[in-house]
C-alpha cells in the first residue's frame, strides 16, 4: 500500500474500450534523425488531439531542457479529455522533472520504467533483481504521493518479454501495491511472437485483475509489433502503446493506424472492443509526422502508404468499380482520404478554403486561415490547379516555421551544360546584410556554398549537408517542389552531433532548396543560442533510453 495516499481502484478503462497511448513524440522521436523542435512537437500534439487518442506521451523531460519545455507546453495546451504522459527512469531526478512538466495537464500521466531482464540488469544497470524492484516501488510510490489519487501512474518493466516470468510478476504485484494504475509490458527489442506474447499478457491480466490496466508496448524488429499488440488485446490488455507511421527506435513501434484500423475492421475478433480514435484524421496525422521528421512512408505501408488504396491490375480495378468491397476491406474515406482533387482557384473565398481544410482534417481560423489563404491564392497564380496535396503541403510548411536570425533577401544563379554554376546570395545574419558569390557543380551546390561563405565569418560555422531530397507535391509540370535537407554545424563533428531537418516548398525548386537550407540553418542557430526552444532528444547521447 502506498504510504499516505490511498491507492485508487479500477477498472480504469471503460468497458468496451481500448485506451490508445500515442508515443510518437517520445519513442517515435527517438528514431535516429527524427528530432523535432518544441514548436513541431506542439503541432504534432495538436494533430493527435484531433485524432482523439487517449494519451499523448509528450517526451522525456529529463533528457534536455528543450524536451522539458516541449512537454510542459503540450501539458498546458492539450484538451481536458486527453491525458499527457511523460517518461522517467527510476532514478533520482527523472521522475521529479517529469512530474514538474506534466502537473499542469488536466490529466497527468506519469510513466516510470526500469529494466527487469537479467541481461539488462547485469550488463546495463549493473544492479540485482532486488535492487531493481526496490527502485521501481520507490518511484511509483513517489509519483502517487506527488500527483495524488487521481493521476495515472504507469510502470514499465523494460525488456519484459525477456524477463524471468516469476520475477516479472513479482515486480508488477509490488508496483500495483505501491500505487501503479497501469502496468506496461514492453517487448523492448521486438523479440516476442504473438502466441507467446498473448500468453504472457494473460498471466499479467490474471495477476492484477481490476487493480490496474494492462498495457503493451511492442517494437517491430521482427515485423510483429502490430500482431503482438493485437494478440495482447485479445488476451486482455486494455492500453496499446503505438506511434503514427510506426515511427520509433530501430524498426519502430506498433503503428497506431494499423492497430486502430484492425480493431475497427475486424470487430468479431475483438468482441465489444473499440477505440475512440477519429480515424478520418489518420492520413493528415501520417503526413504531418512524415513531413516534420523527414521519414518518408513506404508506398506499400498498410493504411497510410501511397499505394494502400491504389488498384493497379485490370481485374482489381474492374472489381472495385463494380463494388469496392471486392478488394477494399475499409474505405479510403474512413482514414481521411477524401479523393477529391481540385480544391481552390484564384476566385475561391476564405470560407470555401476553410471548408476544404476541414475536410482534410484541419480546423483553421483567424490569422492562421488568412496566412494559408494568401499563400493558396498566390499559388493559384503560379500553377494551373491547387490540389489537396498542395494545401496539405502549405499547412505542413507552416508547421515547421522557425524563428529566423538568418534571412534570405535575394539570390541569382547561372548554370549551363558542362560548366560550373555560379551563385550569389544576399542575406542578413542577425540584421547585418551580407552578399557572397560561389561556384559549385550545379545551381543548388553553388548557392549553398555562397550561403556558407556568408555564414562562416558571422557565426564561426556553416551548415554541412548530410541529406538532400526533392519531390513533386502533386502531378503536372507546374507542380510545387518540396525539398528536405538534413544538416549539422560544420564545427560540430563526432557521433553526438545535432542533426536537424529543414523543408522548402516552391514551384521553383532552387528557391525551395535555399529555403530548406535556411530553415535548417536557423534551427541550428536557434539550438546554439537558445537550447530551451529546441528538443532533439534522440541526439542526446547517454540518456540510457530503451
Ligand atoms: O521499448 C521500451 O521498453 C520503452 C519503455 C520505456 C516503455 O520504450
Ligand atoms: Zn519503446
Image: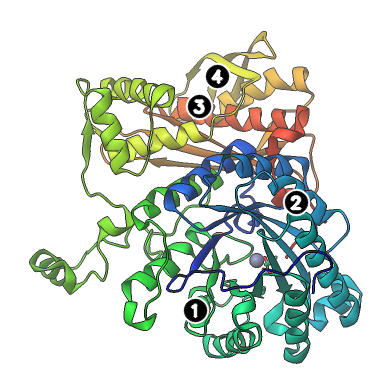
* Residue under label 1: 233
Residue 411 rendering spot, x and y as whole percentages: 52, 15
* Residue under label 3: 443
| Secondary-structure class at tag 1 | helix
Judge by depth and name the residue closer to the eye, 293 or 512. 293
User: Residue 99: which numbered mark, if any?
Assistant: 2
| Secondary-structure class at tag 3 | helix
Q: Is mark 2 within 8 Å of ligand 1?
A: no
* Residue under label 4: 423
Q: Earlier along the polypeptide chain: callout 2 or callout 1?
A: 2
Between marks 2 and 1, how big is the CA–CA gap? 29 Å
Residue 162 rendering spot, x and y as whole percentages: 71, 84
Binning the other alpha carbons within 10 Å of mark 1 as few (below 14), some (14 to 19) or many (20 upward) gives many
Between marks 3 and 1, how big is the CA–CA gap? 54 Å
Q: Earlier along the polypeptide chain: callout 2 or callout 3?
A: 2
Q: Label 4 near label 3: C-beta < 8 Å?
A: yes
Amino acid at each position: 500500500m502506498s504510504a499516505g495516499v490511498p491507492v485508487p481502484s479500477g477498472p480504469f478503462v471503460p468497458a468496451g474500450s481500448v485506451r490508445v497511448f500515442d508515443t510518437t513524440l517520445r519513442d517515435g522521436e527517438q528514431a535516429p534523425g527524427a528530432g523535432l523542435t518544441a514548436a513541431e512537437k506542439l503541432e504534432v500534439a495538436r494533430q493527435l488531439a484531433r485524432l482523439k487518442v487517449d494519451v499523448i506521451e509528450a517526451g522525456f523531460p529529463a533528457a534536455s531542457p528543450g524536451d522539458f519545455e516541449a512537454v510542459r507546453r503540450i501539458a498546458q495546451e492539450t484538451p481536458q479529455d486527453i491525458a499527457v504522459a511523460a517518461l522517467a527512469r527510476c532514478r533520482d531526478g527523472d521522475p521529479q522533472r517529469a512530474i514538474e512538466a506534466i502537473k499542469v495537464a488536466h490529466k497527468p500521466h506519469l510513466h516510470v520504467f526500469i529494466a527487469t531482464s537479467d541481461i539488462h540488469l547485469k550488463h546495463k544497470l549493473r544492479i540485482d533483481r532486488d535492487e531493481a524492484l526496490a527502485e521501481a516501488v520507490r518511484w511509483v510510490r513517489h509519483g502517487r504521493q506527488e500527483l495524488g489519487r487521481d493521476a495515472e501512474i504507469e510502470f514499465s518493466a523494460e525488456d519484459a518479454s525477456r524477463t524471468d516470468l516469476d520475477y516479472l510478476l513479482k515486480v508488477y504485484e509490488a508496483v500495483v501495491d505501491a500505487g501503479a494504475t497501469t502496468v506496461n509490458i514492453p517487448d523492448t527489442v521486438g523479440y516476442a511472437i504473438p502466441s507467446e506474447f498473448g500468453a504472457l499478457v494473460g498471466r499479467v491480466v490474471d495477476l492484477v485483475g481490476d487493480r490496474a490496466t494492462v498495457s503493451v508496448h511492442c517494437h517491430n524488429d521482427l515485423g510483429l509489433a502490430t500482431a503482438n499488440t493485437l494478440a495482447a488485446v485479445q488476451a486482455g490488455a486494455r492500453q496499446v502503446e503505438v506511434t503514427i507511421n510506426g515511427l520509433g527506435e530501430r524498426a519502430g513501434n506498433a503503428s497506431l493506424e494499423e492497430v486502430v484500423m484492425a480493431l475497427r475492421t475486424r470487430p468479431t475478433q475483438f468482441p465489444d472492443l473499440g477505440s475512440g480514435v477519429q480515424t478520418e484524421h489518420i492520413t493528415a496525422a501520417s503526413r504531418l509526422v512524415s513531413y516534420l521528421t523527414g521519414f518518408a512512408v513506404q508506398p506499400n505501408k498498410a493504411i497510410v502508404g501511397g499505394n494502400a488504396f491504389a488498384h493497379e491490375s485490370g481485374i482489381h480495378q474492374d472489381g472495385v468499380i463494380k463494388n469496392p468491397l471486392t478488394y477494399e476491406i475499409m474505405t479510403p474515406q474512413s482514414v481521411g482520404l477524401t479523393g477529391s482533387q481540385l480544391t481552390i482557384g484564384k476566385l475561391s473565398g476564405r470560407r470555401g478554403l476553410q471548408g476544404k481544410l476541414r475536410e482534410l482534417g484541419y480546423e483553421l481560423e483567424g490569422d492562421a486561415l488568412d496566412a494559408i489563404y494568401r499563400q493558396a491564392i498566390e499559388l493559384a497564380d503560379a500553377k494551373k490547379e491547387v490540389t489537396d496535396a498542395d494545401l496539405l503541403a502549405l499547412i505542413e510548411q507552416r508547421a515547421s516555421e522557425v524563428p529566423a536570425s538568418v534571412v534570405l533577401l535575394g539570390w541569382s544563379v547561372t548554370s549551363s551544360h558542362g560548366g560550373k554554376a555560379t551563385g550569389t546570395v544576399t542575406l542578413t545574419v542577425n540584421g547585418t546584410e551580407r552578399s557572397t558569390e560561389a561556384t559549385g557543380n550545379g545551381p543548388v551546390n553553388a548557392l549553398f556554398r555562397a550561403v556558407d561563405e556568408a555564414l562562416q565569418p558571422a557565426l564561426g560555422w556553416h551548415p554541412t549537408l548530410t541529406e538532400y531530397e526533392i519531390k513533386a507535391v502533386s502531378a503536372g509540370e507546374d507542380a510545387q517542389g518540396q525539398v528536405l535537407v538534413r544538416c549539422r554545424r560544420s564545427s560540430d563533428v563526432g557521433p553526438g552531433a545535432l542533426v536537424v531537418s529543414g523543408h522548402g516548398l516552391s514551384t521553383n525548386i532552387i528557391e525551395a532548396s535555399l529555403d530548406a537550407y535556411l530553415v535548417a540553418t536557423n534551427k541550428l542557430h536557434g539550438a546554439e543560442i537558445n537550447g530551451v526552444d529546441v528538443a532533439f532528444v534522440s541526439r542526446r547521447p547517454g540518456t540510457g533510453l530503451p
